[in-house]
Image (cartoon, helix red, strand yellow):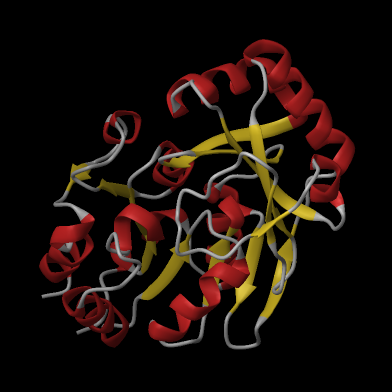
Amino acid sequence: MPAPRAHALIATDLDGTLLRGDDTFSERTLAALARVAAAGARHLVVTGRPAPRVRPLLKILGGAGLAVCGQGAQLYDAAADRLLWSVTLDRETAETALGKIEAEVGEVHAAVDQDGVDGLTLIEPGYRMPHPTLPAERVDRREELWGAPISKVLLRHPVLSDDELAAVARGVVGSLATVTMSGPGTVELQPCGVTKATGLALAAGRLGLGRESALAFGDMPNDIPMFRWAARGVAMAGAHPELKAVADEVTTSNEDDGVAVVLERLFS
């Protein structure tokens, strides 16, 4: 059966959406994605994770195709194992943004994702990775975070909630960077104007598809631009209230195969 034109492009977040809490895909999810491919539709991973942290997951999903990584800062070609496009956040801008935030809320703990298919995740003292399964290297001083080009900065505050920290950051950073919240303990700064929507639009254009073809799945506020760009947005049951407010539909949780539930209905 050919894919319905309205669903020719399936864009899925990873954490809290396509992945279960143990960083695995369920057999039901993999079967649903296989059904999508058999119908001629295209599946795109659109994630905050940088390309090196997405590579092993894409191999499970077939090991080919494109993926939007780093909140839209990277377009990764899995088959060629290379970045087709990337944009970085320069050191001066990152340090200025951090200074403005710390002037308001006191010390924050920072980490960075380096650019490139082999870029590292570096964390300064006091920063705790929200996903303990993701590899990271600890540095002794903040200055060491800027040793190579970066795609984004990750922030945590010892007291403030993610929502509180993100709200302050948005209020003081201005046009220096885009502020996103992509999961528990994950407030991020990325190049100004870069979002999942800009990355998805770039990837869709390469595939010859438009926003009218796109069905997006997500769970956090960083997915809001993607939902607004796509023809239809589906939030997970445990999604952040801000995302649910702009979603066209709410499915079951990632632990209960929420993406597969919708795809099975559409590609029956």
In which quadrant will I find the C terminus? bottom left
Q: Is residue 144 visible?
A: yes
Q: Residue 189, percent across and down?
A: 65, 38
- Residue 13 makes an appearance in the image: no
Residue 205 image offset from top left, x and y in percent: 58, 65
Measuring from the top left, give residue 36's x and y in whole percent. 27, 78
Residue displayed at 78% across by 23% down: 99
Q: Is residue 212 above or below residue 33?
A: above
In the figure, is residue 106 to the left or right of 39?
right
56 versus 226 height, above or below: below
Is residue 209 left or right of 258 when viewed as pictured?
A: right
Q: How many marks?
A: 0
Query: 136 or 25: nearer the eye?
Result: 136
Nearer-the-camera pick, 264 or 5: 264
Q: Quadrant of residue 53?
A: bottom right
| Residue drawn 52% across the image and 70% down it | 54
Residue at the location (85% across, 44% down)? Answer: 90
Residue 195's image quarter? top right
Q: 203 or 119, which lies in front? A: 119
Q: Residue at x 52, y 64 (%)?
A: 204
Q: Is residue 261 above or below residue 130?
A: below
Q: Depth check: 43 or 17 in front?
A: 17
State the image coordinates of residue 79 (x, y, percent, origin top left).
58, 88
Q: Is 147 above or below relative to 263?
A: above
Q: Is residue 164 left or right of residue 123?
A: left
> Is the N terminus in the top left, top right, bottom left or bottom right quadrant?
bottom left
